[in-house]
Image: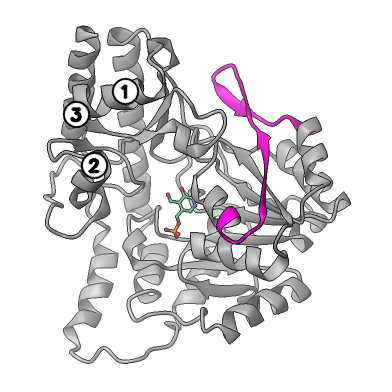
Amino acid sequence: MKYNFDEIIERRGTDCVKYDAVKEIFGCDDILPLWVADMDFRAPDCVYNALARRVEHPVYGYTFLSPRWKPSIKRWLARRYSWSVKYEEIGFVGGIVPALAFAIECFTKPGDGVLIQSPVYHPYTHVTADHGRRVVTNRLLLVDGQYRIDFDDFERKAKECRLFLLCHPHNPGGRVWRRDELGRMADICKRNNVLVVSDEIHCDMMLRGYTHIPFATINDDAAQNCITLMAASKTFNIAGLKSSYHIIKNPEIRARYSEYLRINELDFAPLFSTEPIAAAYDEGEEWLGQMLQYVEANIDYVQQFIEKNLPRLSMIRPEASYLIFIDARGLELGHDSLVRFFVEQAKVGLNDGAMFGPGGEGFMRMNVGCPRATLEEAMHRIKEAYDRL
Ligand SMILES: Cc1ncc(COP(=O)(O)O)c(C=O)c1O
């Protein structure tokens, strides 16, 4: 490997959420954190260099979008997904969760139903409820160790909704939705007049044998009834730059969403938010390939470790990204004791599965975007606690 993903980088003291908020989140300092979804790897050099070049210039005034930004996105989508997008279909938005909130504000009214598939990335619920909209949950089915969609329930629920927040690939669980599944969801949403917001933030991190199909490329109906949200933030470990983008093919939906962003001045790209993204897309692909190989080996390691040492646990093997949903129901601990087991006994900081909504109870989410040594330490801590149970 050209890049050294084994490197241990001290992140404490950088105001980073993952390490520096451990005491606040878990109640003690001696926790090995494998929770919030960023990685412990150094960002690719091309990103660092783009930032450093700009930092060197000592005036940090107002800027506009880097002229490299849209062309780099267009090339990225064409190269990786055979998806042809026009420049006018791409717009800046400062973060995917804010973009979800703006879509809710822009396309629904208080009291309207917003469809989500649970268990799911928790801000989907909060952002909906906090805006006074109704959270309508299509529970995913866990079949043969991975999530499937209950389409009858999906259709029933879609009838009472205006908007569907699709998590593609899905978090937690790392499910990569297939063409047939996307097609059925697209068809149901179209027939029931439900606008789809497809959050594809994890899409660049496909693991062995899986392919990402952007929702909007399924067919013309899907393309015309969809806001796609993408970012380089997870892909290249630059989530702190809060830089993402929307792609909207339908001119009316695009005009309405863009106007909402414009009048609230939400389409304004901060200084460090577009040039490093262009650099990552244009020059970071080799780094990405190697990072994914490293993460895949980490996933293999955890799977083998669990099979060998922790027979009452199992895991949903992710098809994309670096988050493993561990099924700890076999410990039969109940919610509070389970959380205490990982925090107080094992001293590892994972995400409590229950926070992802119905269906997440009894699971814990582990982030394996870290050096192998960190992961080994975490697994051994869990084993010691497990053996004491
Ligand atoms: C599915 C999903 N969407 C959005 C986000 C966060 O996006 P942002 O930081 O751009 O708001 C995450 C972060 O973990 C995520 O997993």
Residue that appears at 50% across and 30% down: 360
Query: In this view of the protein, can residue 183 be seen by the observer?
Result: yes
Q: Is residue 248 left or right of residue 4?
A: right
The image quarter in which residue 351 lies: top left
| Image location (x, y in percent) of residue 119 | 55, 35
The residue to which callout 1 is attached is: 302
The circle on residue 347 is 3
Q: Is residue 141 magenta?
A: yes
* Magenta-highlighted residues: 129-151
Where 38 falls versus 296 (above or below)?
below
Furthest residue toward right: 191
The residue to which callout 2 is attached is: 1
Q: Is residue 108 left or right of residue 170?
A: right
Please tell me whether mark 2 sits on a helix, a strand or a loop: loop
Q: Nearer the viewer, residue 117 or 3?
A: 117
Q: Nearer the viewer, residue 43 or 24?
A: 24
